[in-house]
Each structure stands twice: as structure tokens, then as C-alpha cells.
Amino acid sequence: MASPVLDARPAARSGPAAPPLRRTRVFALPEVRWAALSAAAFLAAFPLDLAGAPAWAWGPLYAVCYLAGGWEPGWAGLRALRERSLDVDLLMVVAAVGAAAIGQYLDGGLLIVIFAVSGALEALATRRTADSVRGLLDLAPATAVRLAGSGEETVPAADLRVGDTVLVRPGERLPADGTVLDGTSDVDQATITGEPLPVPKAPGDGVFAGTLNGTGALRVRVDEDASGSVIARIVAMVEEASATKAPTQLFIEKVEQRYSVGVVVATLALFAVPLAFGADLTATLLRAMTFMIVASPCAVVLATMPPLLSAIANAGRHGVLVKSAVAMERLGRIDRVALDKTGTLTEGAPRVAEVRPTGGPFTEPEVLALAAAAELPSEHPLARAVVDAARRRGLTVPRATDFSSAPGRGVRAVVDGRVVEVGRPAAPPPAAQDGPDVSAAQEARAAAVRDLEAAGRTAVVVTVDGVPAAVLGVADRLREGAADAVAALTRLSGTAPVLLTGDNERAARRVADDVGITDVRAGLLPEDKVAAVREGERAGLRTLVVGDGVNDAPALAAAHCGVAMGRAGSDLALETADVVVVRDELAAVPAVVALSRRARRLVVQNLVIAGVCIGALVVWDLAGHLPLPLGVAGHEGSTVLVGLNGLRLLRERAWRGAGG
């Protein structure tokens, strides 16, 4: 059982609170308000219509549904028509109005609601991504302390110029990209590189705007204007990738122009040509409207949407949020996967993986208990890893006195009358005593450090009274099932995933070896990850990027499809990605890809069914005389049939089959 002293350890500080996300409220968007009004009116009219209520009860409600949901796509379609382009939006509105003209108010209203809601969801997703991009700029502080001949002055960070010198105190964020001139500290730069541990910084080292300074004070020379910082470049890359990404189109939308033109031309011909030869106006109009009803793409729209929406709902029940039908369709078309390391393949939290005693009178548990006692007052992530290791082993941690911390070097404390030092390896310290035992401990220390660093672990040296007692190997732990997920993604895409990380080469190689990845690209900045995605794109490969951090957001935006790990993911990554794995279960990624592929197969099945039904009804109407009730029945029957076929993906075994 853990010691009371250990339990009394103060809560670890998580650093300054993240800046509030500038988040647009859902109903702040007019598209959402109009779609909600249209859907509400339809839902109110629908039961009244089915129950046989008088027209005055449900008629005005249908009118509100049509006007609220149809005016915007109708107006957009008219603008497109003015530019000599005919799209499916206008055809949908015309078909809905045509349905109403011959008494099929329910059909027209359903069509209007489908288009209004899908347009509102797309507008909301676009606005939320823009919110996160703007909020990212808040990572960099608004002001900075500039050092001038007259002393210190607080200035807006945007006013800093190349060559200025700024003072960054402990716990503050860096205001600009630059180079350390004086001071030592550990800087948490996970937002830029994704490294799980703070990086020691000393004179001559580079730092990034928006990263978090540790316990030491730094004097930094500004090397980049605010517009040229890495944070600013991330914003620019996300915006550019979002703007240049291929238009979000479902399968059926790729042929909408020709289909729309064909239906409109045929409807006008069916109306105008018979009239020119003296046909009856009412009969001719009824035939033309019957044609438009049976040829309208209701069944085609439902052929596409129910399988994708059912797959989205099924994935949601298993902790995977797919933001749109377009995203679900894109998932099934990927043929390459790029994975981030920290927070994606690994948990993103350092843990003591092994303890290597270097000789002397102390056992492994005793050394770990002494190290935990010395680290207990510290708030450094390495200190938390050491204390957590002692807690997991149920060790009794004694009290420490005379605690001190040296930024970038480690901690020192007196524990049970012994001087205990814990920190990063440096030159061997002068021993308190000489002798063969001390020399052997120094040699064992050096060998352990070399072995651990070669294995991609962070080495932490523990000395007691100046003599090395042990070396702790700290590493980021793999997520459960990471290797199985990588193998499943390899089977689905046909190629082994690539590892893209800002962490160092040794740590990246260790994780890659553990999960079976051979293509490793380490030490990458956000723009390097985007370049890797673009490289695959130029080779004709559709890339799925899986990440969690701010530094992954540009690659998530540039990818054919982006997946963010939700529990520890940054706001920007969560909003930029097309898919969010809410529970951080890596096995859900191949499962949802497989589910998407099943959905796409059902879409193709439904399109064949819808095409055959529409074709048969159209031929009947053109070659003979299709009674309107029979035409409506055939049209509605095909719509119901493809809808029910798509709903098959709601079943639990659809996910189990995908996951297997």
C-alpha cells in the first residue's frame, strides 16, 4: 500500500490554462436555424398528414418546411443557373415543388429536409474548423517582456522584431521563435514537435513561439517575426489545406450536372412537345410531373445516405465520431496510412520502464524509493513518472528535506541523511569518495545510459552521496493493441503504415520496431508532415493520417481523411480531423475503415437498385401511360427498398465484422 507521505504529494500542475476556444454556437449559423425550422415543421406536419387531418392543419406546416429549407438551395441553384451551370440543389427544389403540385407533399418535404440538414452540417463543420484555427493563435502570448538599454518593457508580441531580446520567466509561454542567449530550462514543446517530455534548453538552442517554459528563466533572441513563427505557419497550412482540399462530394454528386440537365430537359420536352401538337394541357402537365417525380433522385439520394449514416451511427455507438457522410465515404477509399507517435501509437505520458542498479548497497526498490522521495516536490513530467512508478510498486517513500531544483539538470534532496540527486545524464559528477567500487559504479552508469538511449529511452541517473546508484529508463508506453491495429491497417490499405513524428530518431525507431513499422520519419516539424502527405498524393496514394496534437493538424487537414485521438487530442486536431476516436482505442481505426468499405459496397448495391427502378418507371412513362398513383408507388417503393438496405449497417454485427 502506498505511503501516506506519497499520498500527500501535491497535485501535479498542468501548466497555465489553455486559452479559451473561440467556438461558434450551433444556432449562430443561419443555415442551422433554417434547417432546424424546416425539420421541425416537417415533423409536425407528417403525423397530421398520415392521420388524415384536414389540409388546413398540416398544409401551412408543409409550406413552412418548404420555404425554410428550400429557399437557400433554390437561391444557390438560381445563381448557378445564371452562371450557366445546373446543379442538383435546384433540381431538388423543383422536384419538391413538382411533388407538391400534384399532391405529394410528404415526398417533397422529405427531400427538402434532407438537403437542408446536410447543408447545415457542412456549414457547421466548416465554421468549427475556422474557430479552432483562429484559437490556435492564442497559444502565443499577447505580450512579451523585451529587454532594452533602459531595462524591461512589456510590448505586444506582434511588435517584436528580429534581433530583439526577450525575457521568459518560469511557467510563461515563449512569445516568438528564437535562440536562447542565457539561462537553462526545460521547455514543453509538444504543441510543435509532439515530444512527450520537456526538452532541456541552454544557450544556443532554438525555441518556438507558443511552447511552455519550465522552471528556469531564459533570455531569448527573436529570430522570426510573429507572421513567420511555426505557430503562424501551422495556422496558414491548416487554412490552405482546408481551402484546397478536393470539394466534398458524395459518389452520386459527381454526375449531378448531367443528371440534372437530363431530367430538366426531358421534363420540359414532355410538356412542350405534346402541347405544340395540340395535346390537352392538364394531361400533358400531369404526365410531365409524373416523369419528374419518378425520375427525381429521391431513391438515388437515399441510396447513398442511409448506408453512410447507418455506418456513422454504428461507429458512434463504439466511440468513433465520423463528422459527415463524406468523411465516412472517404475512409473506405484510403490506400496508405500515416501514424503519429506520441499520443497516437503511445499514451503520451512517460513511465519508468526499467530500473538498472549500478552496484552498491541499494536494491532496485530502495533506489526507486529514494528517487521518488527526491522527486516528490517536483512538478516535472519525469518526476511524476518516477513517483508514479513507486506508487505502482506500493513502495514506502520517505520524507525529503533541503529540496532544490536546477533547470535542465535535475533535483537534489536529503533523504534519510543521504544526498540524493536525480537528473539527466551529464559528465560524471565528482565522487564523494574514491575507490574501485566508485569507478565500477561510474562505468556501470555510463554503460546503462548508452544502452537505454540506444533503445530510445530517456535515461535518468540516480546518485546517492555522489555515487551512481541506478539509471532509470523512462519511455512513453505503447497503447494497448497498437501492433494489432498497425497489422490490420496494413491489410486494409495494402501497404504498411508510415510513422511521422517530431520526436527523436531513437525513440521513434523503438516504437516502430514494437508495432511492426519500417518506414520511420522522425524529427519532423508540422510542414514536414504535410510534405510527406503531399508526397504520397503525388504518387496517387490517398492517405489516412492519424494524430492528436496541434502539430498534426496541418497533416490532418491535408490528408484524404484525418483521424484524431479524442481523449488527449488538441482542440485544433479534433476540429480539423474528419473522424475522432473518442475513447482513444487505436483498434477502432481499422474497424471504422472496414465499416466504411462495407458502407460503400451497400451504396453501389443501392445505386443499382435505384437505377433499375427509376429506369423502368421512366421507360414506362415514356413508352406508354404510367398512372400517377402507380408511378408514385413505384418511386416510393424503390426509395423504401434502398433505405431499408442501407439500414443493415445499424446492426451490431456490422461493427464486429468490420473489427474482425
Image (cartoon, helix red, strand yellow):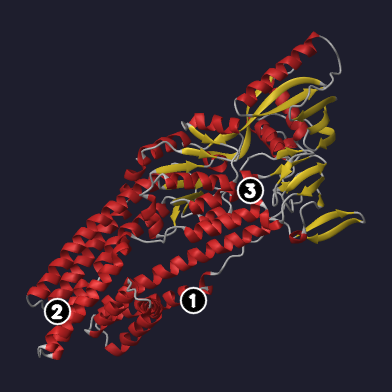
Residue drawn at (11%, 70%) of the image: 619
Report the residue marked by disc 3.
191
Report the residue marked by disc 1.
30
Crowd rating for badge 3 (residues with CA inside 10 Å; few <14, some 14–19, many 20+): many
Q: How far apart are marks 3 and 2 (CA)?
A: 62 Å
Q: In which quarter of the image is the N terminus?
A: top right
Image height check: is 442 above or below 239?
Answer: above
Q: Distance between the residues labelled 2 and 1?
A: 37 Å
For this view, does 630 lie left or right of residue 117?
left
In this view, the residue farthest toward the top is 436
Image height check: is 411 above or below 612?
Answer: above
Question: Considering only order in the chain, which callout, 1 or 2, is on the residue closer to the N terminus?
Answer: 1
The type of residue carrying mark 2 is: Leu
Report the residue marked by disc 2.
628
Q: Distance between the residues labelled 1 and 3?
A: 34 Å
Crowd rating for badge 1 (residues with CA inside 10 Å; few <14, some 14–19, many 20+): few
Residue drawn at (31%, 59%) of the image: 251
Q: Nearer the viewer, residue 302 or 236?
A: 236
Residue 290: x and y, percent? 17, 78
SS at badge 1: helix
Question: Considering only order in the chain, which callout, 3 or 1, is on the residue closer to the N terminus?
Answer: 1
In the image, which is nearer the foreground, mark 3 or mark 2? 3
The type of residue carrying mark 3 is: Thr
Residue drawn at (23%, 74%) of the image: 263
Question: Considering only order in the chain, which callout, 2 or 3, is on the residue closer to the N terminus?
Answer: 3
Residue 267, located in which quarter of the rendered image? Answer: bottom left
